[in-house]
Image (cartoon, coloured by chain):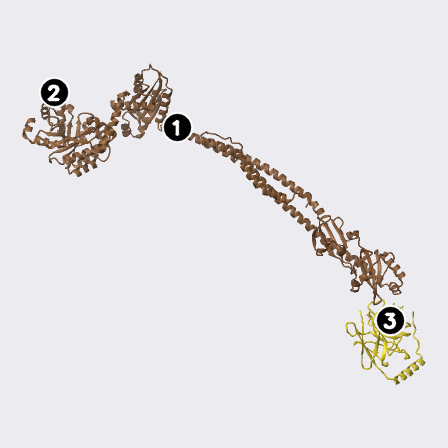
Chain colours: A yellow, B brown
Amino acid sequence: MTSRVPSPNPVRLLLAIGCLAATSATEHRHLDIQVFDQRGLPLRDAVVELARPAGDNRPLVFAWRNAMAQRNEAFVPGTLIVPRDATVAFPNLDTVRHSIYSFSRAARFQIDLYGSDQTRAHQFAVAGTVALGCHIHDHMKGYLRVTDTPYAARSDLDGVAQIGNLPEGTYAVTVWHPQGTGRDGEWHGSVRLVEGRPNRLTIGTR
Amino acid sequence: MTGAPSRSGWRRLIRHAPRWLRSARLRGQGWRGKLEVRVSLHIAALLIAIMVLTVGVADYGLRLYAFSVAERDLAASAGVLDRNLAARQDQMRSEAEVVSRDFGFREAFALSDRKTLQSALASLADRTHAGAALVVGLDGMVTASPGTPPVKGTALLGALNAGRNGGLINVGNHLALGVAARIEMPDLAGWLVLARPLGPRDLAALTGLSGLPIDAGVTDLAGLDPTLAGFEPGTIAHHDGPGGDELVRVSALPSLDSTLHPRLVLRYQLASATRAYHSLRVALASIGMIAVAMGVFLGSRLARGILLPLGRLAVATAAMARGEMVRVEPRGRDELASLARSFNAMVDAIEEREQKITHAWLHDGLTGLPNRRFFQEKLDRAVARRADDSRILVALLDIDDFRLINDTMGHAAGDALLLQFAALLQGAMPGAGVARFGNDEFGVVLDDIGPARDLAALVDELARKLTVDVDLAGQIVPVSASFGVAVCPDDAQDSATMLKHAELALDRARADGKGTYHFFEATLDEVASSRRKLEIALRHAVRNGEFELNFQPLFCPALHAIKGFEALLRWDHPQRGRISPAEFIPVAEQSGLIIPISEWVIRDACRQAATWPATVAVAVNISPSHFRVPGLVSCVVSALAQSGLAPHRLELEITEGVFITNFDTTLDTLRQLRALGVRIALDDFGTGYSSLSYLRAFPFDKVKIDQSFVRDVGTDSSARAVVRAIAALADALGMETLAEGVETETQYDALIIEGCSMIQGYLISRPVPGTEVAAVLARYDDPAAISAVA
């Protein structure tokens, strides 16, 4: 599968700004969910997704760029959350060429060897986990988490995933980690969000 | 252990051997048998012990060696197996890893395209010659090529998750060697597992065990014999297995299957290993037994070789002890032969010595003639076998004056004379038995003399033959012999009596003179026995003081006074009464009793004379015997001292016979006596040897004229002439003369006319006892008595 770079749609852009403005009028709520593994240690690079509440029509877009770069024979960032149907760029910022592949059910593709002077992209139409590897560099591993919900964040070093703009309430949560012991690495549960109070989730990891 | 006889059997033999030895000793077969058996048994026991020890040690050593070889082989095999397994695993793993990395393969896996996967696995299994290729998912789900026996994936998860990539797994129900390669996409999505079955042949090939008696087997711990399971893994242990004694090494093999605990069991059949040494052991045992047999045989041969000659020697020695002279036969050239030869030499020497001793026992050393003992035996034999009508003659001979010749010419000459005489004697009577009894005494025995033979003529001829001149060291010496003859059965019936009678006859012959012989007369025996009786009586008399001194006065006509008394010995025998000195003096002289008698006479004479007036002396006769022994001078000295008698009052009368033997010592004694002041008178002058030189040799004080001259002086002019001569001679030499045995006045007158200074005889007085001496003196003091004489 090959991809080509689409040109930005000005209309869409304006619409995005408008939505942003609209939502900014309502209350911001930063909700922290702290993820721990079964040993009690903070779990980093876990993806926390909260299911869209009913009637929510927040646009599926994230603050970060949908790009998985390769630098120093490693995928940067190691874990990337991308919206469904997003086209993710794979810039090669490395001095060597790479050949990316994935056997994941969510996306099965491979990119032939390309160098730093080139970039490639692929569209991910299925939600789920995409494990990326490099044909010639066995140690290169990267993960794309293709998600339906905008309410997704990656846990940092402290295991804290900051998810904003959600009212208090109970939400269905999915926590994914590469070593997660649940099916496909996903942990499903529900969480009751209370402002100002961090929410702790413990998932099992290998 | 199979094969050779057990060690316990040998030990039993050794324990019982001493008992057999002891019983062999008790089973007395004569000393030779015992010793031989003992030696053989000892050698046998020693050899058996040595061989048993050797075989035992060799056996043990072989076993140890076989053991160590087995251990080495087992350890080596185990090591080889480990390395081969690892090598095979590495190879399989690299093949698996190639496939697990393959994109297509991973794609097929990701697609969960089971069919594709299975065919890919089948192809892989073929390619790698593995028995099975399968994929194990993270959940333990197994995808395998069709036809693969079932594998429990969940059992492998533990090992796989732990990261182990090699080990044994259960394929179907068979053990297989498995390797796992991670399937990464890029996360671990599963494992590709290749498995190769481990059959016995594979194991054998793996362990490189062709030819060695090692069985290799891999079994799960569960299916392992509990004994084997109990062994510490990696160590070699002894095990009595179904196949016999064996060495076993159990070691653990890595396993991917958590339910599987495979054990590699290496068995080493010791029986086959020791089989190789079995023949060696048999050979050793055979050598041992042959050695024992040979040793026993040789030992017994050797023993016999020593013991037979020893036995013969012992028998010979025992015979020797009994007195038989036995020789042994030396066989061979070894020490025993030389011992036998030495033994023979010893026997020879003993025999020779015995013969010499016997000879010396029976023969005289100087002349080689038989000695008295032998002579006696011969005589006994002759007497025993004498025929009724035959006679035996025994003559005992004495060489006349032998002592004189010995003294004057020396002992060498005397010995030469004896030798010559012996030869003479032997030649004189051939057929007679000749013997030397000792000193100068010889014996002759002649037997089987017919009744008609003239014995006197025989003896006479013998006497003639023995009267010869012999050349002794250049000097011609006349030799003659006196002999006494006794005849059997006339004079005696047994040898002892014959000898005694011959001896008596010899005594008589000696008394008769030189060169004479005398036949035995019965009277001689009587004479001899009476003489012996007298001798005994004399001894008694000496002890008991039965002697008495009588005194006969010595009258001096010139002074008409008695100047002295001659002491005469009288003996009153308790039974026989008075015995004349003529009878007992010779016996005293012969027996040597004369010495104590003489000493007593001197002492008593001095004692009695001391009581007489000082003008009266006492004259004592001294026997020549007394001069032959030392002590005369001291006797005189002590007698004089004891009595207090003045020496000049003692007069010693000696005969010329004193000079015959030892002239010089006699002279010396006389001088000593004279030095004391004692007077010496020469008695019996004119008879006997009458050597005038004796008168010159010593300054006698007195010469006594023998009564044989005095008897005829009255009638015979020649007798008067002799007396006149003696008186003149004596006077010229300054000696007194005394005439003995004066009985008549005619003799008295004649004697005075011829110049005799003193008179002694019955005319004056007969000998009187000491008590009457004073009376006699008194009588001659009386002038009337004197005139009666004058």
Instruction: Name the spot of residue B172 as percent of width and height, x first.
Output: 83, 56
Q: Do labels 1 and 3 share a chain?
A: no
Q: Residue furthest bottom?
A: A25
Tell me whether circle 1 and circle 3 mark residues in contact (CB < 8 Å).
Answer: no
B734 with respect to B342 (left or right): left
Residue that label 1 marks: B359
Residue A100 falls in image quadrant: bottom right
Q: Is mark 3 on a helix, strand or loop?
A: strand
Residue that label 2 marks: B715
Q: Is mark 2 on a helix, strand or loop?
A: loop
| B549 relative to A103, above or below | above
B529 with respect to B250 (left or right): left
Residue that label 3 marks: A129
Badge number at residue B157:
none
Q: Counting other residues with Cα less than 10 Å from the Cα at mark 1, is it few (<14), some (14-19), or many (20 or more)?
A: some
Q: Which amino acid does label 3 sit on?
A: Thr
| Parent chain of label 3 | A
Q: Which amino acid does label 2 sit on?
A: Thr
